[in-house]
Each structure stands twice: as C-alpha cells, then as structure tokens.
Amino acid sequence: MKRFFNIVFWIALIAYLFVTVSFVSGRRQEQVCTSVKITVVDSVRSRFVTVSDIDKMIDTRNLKLSGKRFDSINTWKLGEFLNTYAPVGRADVYKTINGTVHVDIKQRSPLLRVINRYGESFYLDEQGEALRHTSQYCAHVMVANGYISQQAPGQKSFNVLDIKPEPGTRSIIRELFELAKYIDDDKFWKAQIQQIYVNGDGDFELIPRVGAHVIVFGRFENQDKKFSNLKAFYQNGLNVEGWNKYDIINLKYSGQIVATKR
C-alpha cells in the first residue's frame, strides 16, 4: 500500500510540475517588453560607446522593443547586430521575468592613439582593432605619430594583426602595435614611456615622461635585450649622472648603447 501511495505521489508531483511549467511558459510567451535597460559596463575606463549610441543603433533597425511580445524578440540576433559596431567588444542581450530586456555592453579597451602623417587620428585597442577617433572623447593612452602611412579606418574597421607584409617589407603600424603592447604589459615601461615617434627612416623613437632625452629604439626587434640594456643604463647611469645629461640614447646597435651628451 505504501508503495502504491508513493507512486501516486510522484505521478501527481510530475503532473503538477508539468502544468506549472506550461502555465509559466504560456504566460512568458504572452508577456510584453515593458522596458529596455542598456548598460555600458566599463564606462569609467573608456567612453567610446554611450547608452545613447546603442539606443540609436537599436532605433535605426526599427527595433522598438518596448511593447513587443517577448517571444518575438530575438536577443541573440540583436546581440550579433550590436557586435558589428567596432567599439563594442561584446554585447550581451537577455530578458528577465519582470518584462525588461537588458543590453550589457563591454567596450574595446584603447591601447594606443595613432596620428598618421596626414593628420588623421585613430586608436588601436588591446587586440589590434582600429577604432575611429571621436571628438566626444579622448582616451589617455600612449600616442604614436610621425611617418605613419596607415590611414584611419572608414566605415569598416581593420585589425593590424591581419596585415601580412610582403617578404622583405615591414608593416610599421603592426610593429607599432606590438611595441605599444610590449610597453603596456611592463609596469615599469608603461609608467615611463608616453610617446612613440616614427622618424623618416622608419625607426621608432621613444619619448619618456622623465628626462629630456630621446630613445632611438630602431625597429621592433631584439626588444627584450634593448629594454634590458636601457633599464640597466637608467639604473646605473642616469640615476648617478642625472636624467638631463644626455640628449639621445641609441639602442639600435646590437648589444650596446650609444649615448650622446647634451
């Protein structure tokens, strides 16, 4: 008899759960969107994307979400559309039971501001993606300027890591990105270097925050050795003789530093 009641109990429980889930599912399909909440989750660090930008993107696609039935809103498709906007690193779109559609935006993180030889300005993010410069916001990051021929991105962005130079040639913009990434990944050099200048020979010149000297780095090659030698020169030379004694510190030559006194 006990076994019989157990069987009846479990059948009744399963039936109850089935009816409840069906009821909730039906109610959810009938539910309409009462509000849209757009959040730019890292707006303190960067302001390449604003709530207004995302709202306009949704509006231009005639995606009037408020008042629409939940089952007619394709959150995956909306997220894919928002991810086509270059400054957006990731867009997460989801619904909550209170009738709200949430749009959470993670921006791309700027690494380097590039001012090319034509006076155009754009940014490279931490993944090498080019971002158009906006007059509404200027990121406080390292600056690269000088003889840089790479033009600013138009309607379509590009990634410098996709640039494959011909054999025997080099990509200045790709090397710039790799040098900026190397500096940014090192706590000491990130605090020290504020600008990269590309001279007429295609050599990189580093402009430090402290001291009146220019560091001729050359091409982005043997970077570990060059920075190791430079740090030793800083610690054993400039700390002793003074930070303004030298005009030029040249790292181009293999295994040595050539310093020109002011």
Image: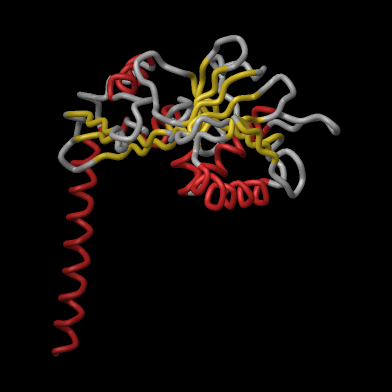
**Location of residue 149 by image quarter:** top right
Residue drawn at the location 64% of the way across and 24% of the way down: 198
Residue 28 percent location from the top left of the image = 21, 41
Residue drawn at the location 81% of the way across and 29% of the way down: 169
Q: Is residue 126 above or below residue 9?
A: above
Side of 258 where 23 appears, left or right: left
Quadrant where the C terminus lies? top right
Residue drawn at the location 17% of the way across and 68% of the way down: 13
| Image label count | 0
Report the front residue among 155 and 76: 155
Side of 112 where 7 appears, left or right: left
Quadrant where the N terminus lies? bottom left
Residue 103 seen in render:
no
Q: Furthest residue to the bottom?
A: 1
Colouring mode (rainbow / by chain / secondary structure / one colour): secondary structure
Side of 22 where 199 appears, left or right: right
Residue 232 percent location from the top left of the image = 58, 52
Report the front residue among 191 and 39: 191
Residue 178 percent location from the top left of the image = 62, 39
**Location of residue 161 by image quarter:** top right
Report the front residue among 190 and 87: 190
Report the front residue among 69 and 214: 214
Residue drawn at the location 24% of the way across and 38% of the way down: 29
Q: Furthest residue to the top?
A: 118
